[in-house]
Image (spheres, grey):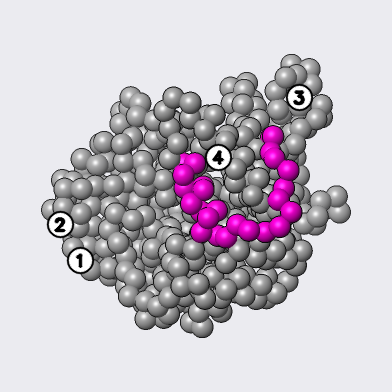
Amino acid sequence: MLFAGIAATSAAVTATSGRKAKVELLAGALRELAAGGDPVEIAAGAAYLSGELRQRQIGVGWAGLRELPPPAESATLDVRAVDAALESMGLISGQGSQARRRAAVGALFGAATADEQRLLTALIGGELRQGAQAGLLADAVALAAGVPAAVVRRALLLSGDLKAVAATALAEGEAGLSALRLSVGTALAPMLAQSAPDPEQALAATGAPAAVDAKLDGIRIQAHRDGDEVAVFSRSLDDITARVPEIVAAVRALPVRAVVLDGEAIAVDERGRPRPFQETSGRAAQRASGALTSYFFDLLHLDGTDWIDEPGTARWAALDAMLPAAMRVERTLAETPEQARQAFAAALAAGHEGVVVKAAQAAYEVGRRGAGWVKVKPRHTLDLVILAAEWGNGRRRGWLSNLHLGARDPNGGFVMLGKTFKGLTDAMLAWQTERLLELAVERDDFQVTVRPELVVEIAFDGVQRSTRYPGGVTLRFARVLGYREDKSAAEADTLDAVRALGAAEADA
């Protein structure tokens, strides 16, 4: 398939607002890829349609795209040739590598038409905004392959690789997808929780009885063990094994052959109380001094058996049988609202940030914000994405200060909710200025517009209607609590979630 076909589909998807129409456009391109019968081409094309490269890193950033050759007059590049060129760029190293990489970029872009150059620039810069996120493309794969969307989504969640799932679906159909299983050593997208303003409403949502887990203010971890081999992944599926040797040792000491555990890692003080999140995240970001303690709350696999489809009560019983109490998150079974309130109060008294109420019969919904888990915190917080930042004045001159905050919208973009500079320390101002300039796509004397990648945790006093912002809502007294580099922009809170909070306040 010509790369021009991918570029044309991408442009058409960008210009289309309806979800169904987007899916049909993507499915048409996937069918054309499948007709070629080349698994590598299918995987690469699927990656491009979702706004990504098949290669995680190729060593080319925005600086390498500033001076490009004029576009070709006619389309000659096929998808396989583009993939091979990008693959070779990622392998360039050693003396003179920058010059050789610039030459490779020039050769590829010189063979690309204007439309193809635009797509390549967006892909390499991480700036493709066509709304073709994983959910849309998963539906398109299902339509193109003629298999149920639920089968595609499950295969995607188990494998964690949309490119591979697309290739399997288009080549082997439902039978190939159904054969996919959890693979110990391959990170799974974790199950996430919905939100409720108090324990009573959380219990009403899950039904009673339910487990009430302490919500630790740490970093989400997923620990995999296969024999003596142990791997630890973050919630964004990054491999952090080398940074957490103490967690590796603890998992390796368990009396099992193979296991996959979901939990949290936190730094604790001499009394065993949680230390501030910044200390935990800083410790996990690099192999620094100060041990992290791991606490697990769910079992996904044990000695050859997958547990993700089993009810919570069965998973937790198996977890309790193989894991020492000192390594388990504190859990209370609540049958009444009063018991849920007591567990919530106990978690806060222990220094935790809240609780997660979990339906006793709920399966582990890989990669989903499932209705079976509902979190409760004592204050309103949202994980939002920074869209831009304004240059500061006075003592903040020279720093990027006022942050433009965005929530995810249903089409894969972001909707601005407001601005804030409250809560920012001098250290945070210095750090965010450096980080946001790395993400800059446009800048002037007033503000810097950035790629929407940096997630920030925002506390606020409420949600109110607004005609100023496109989502129709804004936050009252928004202030920055900290950055969540452990989260991707795809995990930020949605506009629908913000509106739901506003509606709940209005009804209270």
Q: Amino acid at mark 2?
A: Arg
Q: Quadrant of the N terminus?
A: bottom right
Q: Which residues are magenta?
A: 66-90
Tell which circle, 2 or 1, labels the residue nearer the N-terminal end: 2
Toward the top, the furthest residue is 395
* Residue occupying image coordinates x 61% and y 26%: 434
Q: Is the residue 106 above or below the residue 139 in the image?
A: above
Tell which circle, 3 or 2, labels the residue nearer the N-terminal end: 2
Is 70 inside the magenta-drawn segment?
yes
- The answer to whether the residues at label 4 and label 2 have Cβ atoms under 8 Å apart is no
Instruction: Tell me how far mark 3 sits from mark 2, CA to CA.
Output: 55 Å
- The answer to whether the residues at label 2 and label 1 have Cβ atoms under 8 Å apart is yes
Question: Which residue is labeled 4 in the image?
Answer: 104
Question: Which residue is labeled 1 in the image?
Answer: 304
Image coords of residue 35 (percent x, y): 52, 76
How busy is the neighbourhood of tag 3: few (under 14 within 10 Å), some, or many (20 plus)?
some
